[in-house]
């Protein structure tokens, strides 16, 4: 089941991102655009179902949206990278880190997505598989939010 929640705070979120190789990702790569932060794992069928939709959203909103895949299972980094490469998925993958846990709390269900405005405010937070049309609406909301 899909459960949508509203953010618990009006404060902007702050976090740092680390690529699967352990290299930090500079904030300039994602700040100033809406962000769709998607927590997933390669063993999660609903997660894999969303991936092509996420890629399509990024392609449709180039320059306004950054999709970031957070691999929630540290034992699956290589498998996640191979899965994405085989399917031509180009959005970045990052590690689930203490910084992300501090910003978004513990992630207990996959997939979980946060739709973040260009001003770094969480506009939508959803757990479970989300229909493509809902994702599109949530992305539009995040892009519009100031």
Image (cartoon, rainbow, N blue to C red):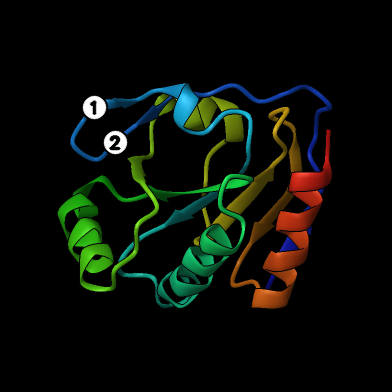
Is residue 11 something one can see in this rendering? yes
Residue 141 horizontal side relative to residue 46, left or right: right
The x and y percentages for residue 137 are: 78, 64
The x and y percentages for residue 13 are: 66, 25
Position of residue 113 relative to residue 94, above or below, is below
Residue 31, by quadrant, is top right
The span from disc 2 to disc 1 (Cα, nearest Å) is 5 Å
- Label 1 element class: loop
The x and y percentages for residue 21 are: 18, 36
Pick the front one: 115 or 108: 115
Residue 138 - label? none
Q: Residue at x 51, y 33 (%)?
A: 30
Quadrant of the frame with the C terminus: top right
Is residue 131 something one can see in this rendering? no
Query: Quick check: marks 2 and 1 in contact, CB under 8 Å?
Result: yes
Q: Which residue is mark 1?
A: 23
Dot 2 crowding, Cα within 10 Å, few <14, some 14–19, many 20+: some
Q: Which residue is mark 2?
A: 19
The x and y percentages for residue 90 are: 35, 57
Q: Residue at x 48, y 24 (%)?
A: 28
Pick the front one: 127 or 143: 143
């Amino acid at each position: 089941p899909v459960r949508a929640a509203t953010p618990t705070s009006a404060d902007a979120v702050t976090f740092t991102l680390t690529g699967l190789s352990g290299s930090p990702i500079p904030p300039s790569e994602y700040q100033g655009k809406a962000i769709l932060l998607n927590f997933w794992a390669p063993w999660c069928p609903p997660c894999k179902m969303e991936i092509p939709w996420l890629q399509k959203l990024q392609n449709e909103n180039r320059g306004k949206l950054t999709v970031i895949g957070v691999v929630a299972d540290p034992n699956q980094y290589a498998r996640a990278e191979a899965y994405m490469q085989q399917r031509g998925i180009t959005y970045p993958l990052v590690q689930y880190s203490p910084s992300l846990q501090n910003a978004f709390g513990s992630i207990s269900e996959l997939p979980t997505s946060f739709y973040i405005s260009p001003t770094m405010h969480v506009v939508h937070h959803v757990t479970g598989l989300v229909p493509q049309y809902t994702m599109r609406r949530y992305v539009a909301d995040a892009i519009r939010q100031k």
